[in-house]
Amino acid sequence: MQMRRTTAMLRQCQLCLRLASTRQIAPSGVPVSRSAGRRGYAISSMITPGGPSSATRSNKREPAKDEAIRSRLVVLVDPVSGSLLPPARLDAVLASMNRNTHYIVDTQARSPGPASVSMPLPVRDQSAGYPIVRIRSKAEEVQKAREESEKRRARKKLGLSATGQLEEKEVQLSWHVTPHDLKHKLSVAARTLAKGGRTMVELQGTRAQPAPVDPQVRRRFVDAVQEQLITATTDELKATDRIALSKYKDDAVRGFRTTLYFQGPKPSK
């Protein structure tokens, strides 16, 4: 009896294997034909789902520089007039400049090339045109990067975002927020106000914890939040005197929801 059961189980396993081999399920769960391979792996399964394609990755690459420019002929932009010079050999352009202080970069634009030239060229040069390149100064690039870094630090000190706008912070509070959470959220908002930014504080209730019905209770809580925010901003600025926060917009009260709009003091230069 045991032998019969074992034989039956083996036959059932063989039947399952046959069915699986006829469908040939790919690792990604997509059925493929037998021509995809003996193991049934689909070609598309080799690509990571959701991963960037080769075209997307190529668009994110930095422009080619110097010998990395894949062309024998290039069209140089005149540094003085800005006009395009006649096509020249890449190695000749590199040999004519000081490689210690300057380099050339591909602008990722193409200039139409002649139909026929005297020197042998790759098919790519004849069909796609010549790369347009510019001469860059290494010292100027370093200085430019240093100036951009100083501008970012200055914007951060003035409470400005990367776009030059005033930094804004939004804080959501419940009417029944715990003292620990209240202190943490207001301390984060105080950092923005200390840099001259703006902070919007919104107080509202939830279904589990509705807002207090008594308007006087809500008013006292709003005053406490404002006082604690002023204290946190004063501590952030390490000021000896208590600072004053202005309002960049009138406070809004809609039913049991209250929104406060605070403006930090102007940073001192």
Image (tube, rainbow, N blue to C red):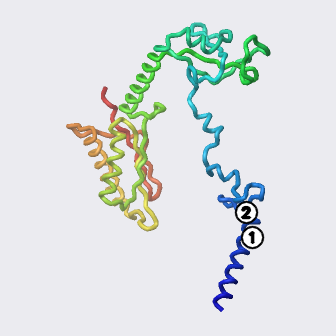
**Res 123 → quadrant:** top right
* Left or right: 46 in relation to 175: right
Residue 99 in the image: state x and y as whole percent: 50, 14
**Position in image of residue 198 (x %, y %):** 40, 40
Q: Which residue lies furthest to the left in this view?
A: 240
Task: Name which quarter of the figure residue 15 lies in.
Answer: bottom right
- Of label 1 and label 2, which has the lower sequence position? 1
Circle 1: residue type: Leu
Seen in the picture, residue 11 relative to 94 is either above or below; the reply is below
How many numbered discs, if any? 2
Q: How far apart are marks 1 and 2 (CA)?
A: 8 Å
Residue ID at (42%, 65%):
210
Where's the N terminus, which quadrant?
bottom right
Q: Nearer the viewer, residue 154 or 248?
A: 154
Which of the two residues, 26 or 58, is positioned nearer the viewer here?
26
Q: Mark 1 points at which residue?
A: 19
Q: Which residue position holds label 2? A: 24
Residue at point 77%, 66% (across, down): 22
- For the C terminus, which image quadrant? top left
Please, what is the three-letter code of the amino acid marked with disc 2?
A: Gln
Residue furthest out toward the right:
115
Quick check: marks 1 and 2 in contact, CB under 8 Å? no
Where residue 199 appears, x then y in whole percent? 40, 43
Q: Which residue is at a point 56% across and 22% down the rendered structure image?
A: 65
